[in-house]
């Protein structure tokens, strides 16, 4: 669905007719406006008069391109309903529409919940969320409630059970994605090989949210108001969600606060253990934190693909591909901590990620199309000059970009286990990561 479609009066009238049929109530005035956030799906605020009462709903539908791992909207609606029925603090799910005559694709409506969800803002603005230790404990208790949902739950028959084990199934999914790429990713293969060798046996199987983190829950000044974004949920090991929530990549710079950047992990653990009756094993969480960074690295590559190949122009998506060296650095730190070697040659930075020319081109488009029209007249010439400079820089970087080194052979050898006893591999991979990190984000280089 194009972003402008819901602002078409005819489309809004079709939406109003659907709401009337689904609710059994008369619909009056209806307006729709896009909401910020939602890197994978589109969210719209729908203001509607329903049975003579003004109500605010949220409509959730597909973005122009999608991430392979995410569910469709019908499946996400079923998951939201299951969570709501289990007592999880989520927006109330209202109606699912699968009639393409309304918007051209599946969508659902849920009741709007007040609050802020942006992860970096929640972490940094201490006025949000109330007492942070209590917030972390409450989130642990919410996660425990999610984990009460078990295979056989009504409406969730579409979720497959793990074939071998939750860990080995996830490794297979991530490897399948890497197999479809033009270049190898030795650091990711090295991390996946470690995970394969350390994989825990299958234990308790529960519904895992699979994206439970800062940025996917909503808070107001007092505390938690909703758990959001159920598009990755699956049957799995409950420690999956613990590791994901505590992963370094979701702390938004507050690295010392290991529970989502908001509190020490002990507060999060305490809430979870009290509500679930499970004991959290530190080694198990460490394993799933490594998995979290591998999984986010592959999702980052998929997000980059949406810009490069999926026809969805987005500076955010293009930049997401540049977080890969930071994730690889953390994978190395978690799997094999130790001193960092000197960076490798500069051509190691040419591995698969958005070239500088593409980033400059997309930034230039945002400047000209998004910012220039709203700038004061006396600043527009300056903005056009900046855009011209970016175009020149982009063409020059494209002309001098080194050929990307072919890492497929090394990646394949790592996967096959031929480097399991190679003590020098860690430092060779680390040196290449540092070379790329020096370009993508020098501030993230080890001190």
Image: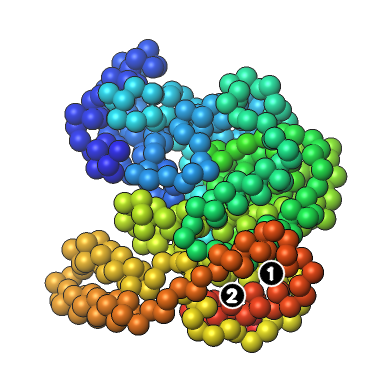
Q: Which circle's residue, 2 or 1, is located before the other in the chain?
A: 1
Name the residue tied to disc 2: 433
Which residue is found at the position 71% from the left and 74% from the top? 426
Callout count: 2
Q: Which mark is residue 396?
A: none
Q: In this rendered view, identify the residue nearer to me: 361 or 137.
A: 361
107 left or right of 116 in image? left
Label 2 close to label 1 by CB (< 8 Å): yes
Q: Position of residue 295 (x, y in %)?
A: 60, 53
Q: In this rendered view, identify the residue nearer to me: 194 or 378.
A: 194
The image shows residue 410, relative to residue 51, as above or below, that is below
84 left or right of 419 in image? left
Query: What quarter of the picture does the N terminus occupy?
Result: top left
User: In the structure shown, which secondary structural element does the residue marked by tag 1 occupy?
Assistant: helix
Q: Position of residue 123 (x, y in %)?
A: 58, 60
Which residue is found at the position 45% from the left and 66% from the top? 353
- The reply to whether residue 21 is visible in this rendering is yes
What is the spatial separation of the Cα atoms under label 2 and label 1, in whole angstroms? 9 Å
Name the residue tied to disc 1: 332
Which residue is found at the position 68% from the left and 84% from the top? 341
Badge 1: few (under 14), some or many (20 or more) residues near its Cα, within 10 Å? many
The image shows residue 426, relative to residue 134, as above or below, that is below
The image shows residue 15, relative to residue 312, as above or below, that is above
Badge 2: few (under 14), some or many (20 or more) residues near its Cα, within 10 Å? many
Q: Position of residue 447 (x, y in %)?
A: 65, 83
User: In the structure shown, which secondary structural element does the residue marked by tag 2 occupy?
Assistant: helix
Q: In this rendered view, identify the residue nearer to me: 299 or 260.
A: 299
- The reply to whether residue 261 is visible in this rendering is no
The image shows residue 223, relative to residue 359, as above or below, that is above
Q: Position of residue 77 (x, y in %)?
A: 50, 29
Which residue is found at the position 36% from the left and 54% from the top? 309
Q: In this rendered view, identify the residue nearer to me: 398 or 324.
A: 398
């Amino acid at each position: 669905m194009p972003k402008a479609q819901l602002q078409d009066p005819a489309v809004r009238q079709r939406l109003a007719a659907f709401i009337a049929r689904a609710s059994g109530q008369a619909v009056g005035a209806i307006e729709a406006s896009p909401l910020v956030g939602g890197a994978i799906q589109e969210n719209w605020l729908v203001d509607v008069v329903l049975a003579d009462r003004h109500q605010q709903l949220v409509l959730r539908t597909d973005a122009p391109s999608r991430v392979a791992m995410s569910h469709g909207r019908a499946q996400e609606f079923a998951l939201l309903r299951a969570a709501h029925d289990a007592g999880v603090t989520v927006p109330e799910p209202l109606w699912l529409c699968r009639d393409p005559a309304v918007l051209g694709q599946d969508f659902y409506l849920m009741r709007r919940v007040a609050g802020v969800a942006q992860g970096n803002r929640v972490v940094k603005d201490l006025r949000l969320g109330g007492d942070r230790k209590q917030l972390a404990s409450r989130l642990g208790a919410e996660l425990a409630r999610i984990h009460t949902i078990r295979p056989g739950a009504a409406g969730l028959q579409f979720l497959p059970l793990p074939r071998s084990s939750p860990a080995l199934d996830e490794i297979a999914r991530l490897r399948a994605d890497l197999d479809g790429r033009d270049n190898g990713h030795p650091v990711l293969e090295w991390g996946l090989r470690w995970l394969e060798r350390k994989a825990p046996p299958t234990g308790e199987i529960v519904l895992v949210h699979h994206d439970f983190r800062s940025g996917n829950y909503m808070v107001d000044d007092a505390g938690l108001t909703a758990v959001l974004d159920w598009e990755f949920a699956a049957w799995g090991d409950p420690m999956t969600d613990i590791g994901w929530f505590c992963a370094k990549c979701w702390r938004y710079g507050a690295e010392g606060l290991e529970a989502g950047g908001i509190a020490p992990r002990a507060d999060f653990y305490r809430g979870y253990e009290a509500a679930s009756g499970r004991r959290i094993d530190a080694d198990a969480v460490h394993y799933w934190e490594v998995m979290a960074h591998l999984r986010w690295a592959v999702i980052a590559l998929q997000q980059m693909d949406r810009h490069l190949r999926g026809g969805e122009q987005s500076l955010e998506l293009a930049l997401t591909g540049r977080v890969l060296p930071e994730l690889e650095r953390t994978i190395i730190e978690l799997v094999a901590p130790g001193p960092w070697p000197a960076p490798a040659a500069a051509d190691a930075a040419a591995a698969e990620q958005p070239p500088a020319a593409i980033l400059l081109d997309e930034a230039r488009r945002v400047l000209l199309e998004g910012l220039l029209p709203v700038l004061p007249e006396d600043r527009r010439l300056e903005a056009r000059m900046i855009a011209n400079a970016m175009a020149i820089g982009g063409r020059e970087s494209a002309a001098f970009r080194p050929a990307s080194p072919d890492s497929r052979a090394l990646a394949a050898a790592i996967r096959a286990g031929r480097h399991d006893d190679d003590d020098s591999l860690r430092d060779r991979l680390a040196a290449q990561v540092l070379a790329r990190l020096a370009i993508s984000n020098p501030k993230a280089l080890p001190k």
